[in-house]
Amino acid sequence: VSMSHELRGSRSILMLRSTRESGGVRKSNIVPSHGHLTIPRHLRDIVITEYGIADLRSRSDAECIQALIEISDAEFQEKLLEAARSEGKIPKSYRIPEWARNNTPAALKAKIREGQKDGTFQPFALGSDFTPDEQRIALALEKLKSRSEKPGFVGKFGLVRFLMTSIGADHSHFRAELTRMGLERPRGLKEKLYAQLLVAALKES
């Protein structure tokens, strides 16, 4: 960070997700204050989330707060604004712009789908040694892993409900993927369960 401010034409770029999940609860990674800071305010520069870019270099505290709120998740924007106003760090006249209020996972997914349709967004942006079948498997297993980490997935029939989506499905659509995983002709209950889970994850992804 220090070097980026010393080198001619250089910028410091920090990238982060706007939210995280902790114990099944969504939390904002952009917060009003934090006890442990490693970057002094005179070295703040560019911050990027999935919702946009905040250029903070040489800007006032109020301008930095506005810019960070505008690239945060819409679910947390009002709380961030309220905290800033209570500390007198942002003008009372400031209003979150309408375009920033659309910072939601659903809106982001819609934009990604548009990019996938026209070929802008590829599943593996920097290329991959995986075959197309393996790419689909990797994305499905990632989806399955994410689901399994949520509270109540195994208990409360979450797993059963997920498996129900693949029961009666035409497995021939996923023959290549099942073959790659050695599950085209499952042997025993465990492999049958694995095959059903894979098909359900492939359908969802």
Image (cartoon, helix red, strand yellow):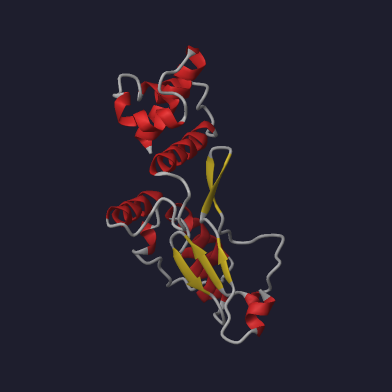
Q: Residue at x 58, y 58 (%)?
A: 31
Which of the 4 image quadrants contains residue 198?
Answer: top left
Closer to the camera in the image, 117 or 48 = 117
Residue 191 x/y as whole percent: 49, 19
Tell me if residue 110 comes above or below residue 145 in the rendering: below
* Quadrant of the rendering where the C terminus is positioned: top left
Compared across the picture, whether 116 is left or right of 41 comes to left
Tell me if residue 102 comes above or below residue 165 in the rendering: below
Q: Is residue 66 visible?
A: no
Closer to the camera in the image, 176 or 5 = 176
Tell me if residue 162 comes above or below residue 33 in the rendering: above
Compared across the picture, whether 148 is left or right of 96 comes to right
Q: Can you name the residue that lies furthest to the bottom here?
A: 8
Residue 157 x/y as whole percent: 46, 20
Closer to the camera in the image, 76 or 109 = 109
Q: Residue at x 49, y 21 (%)?
A: 156
Compared across the picture, whether 182 is left or right of 203 comes to right
Which of the 4 image quadrants contains residue 99?
Answer: bottom left
Which of the 4 image quadrants contains residue 197?
Answer: top left
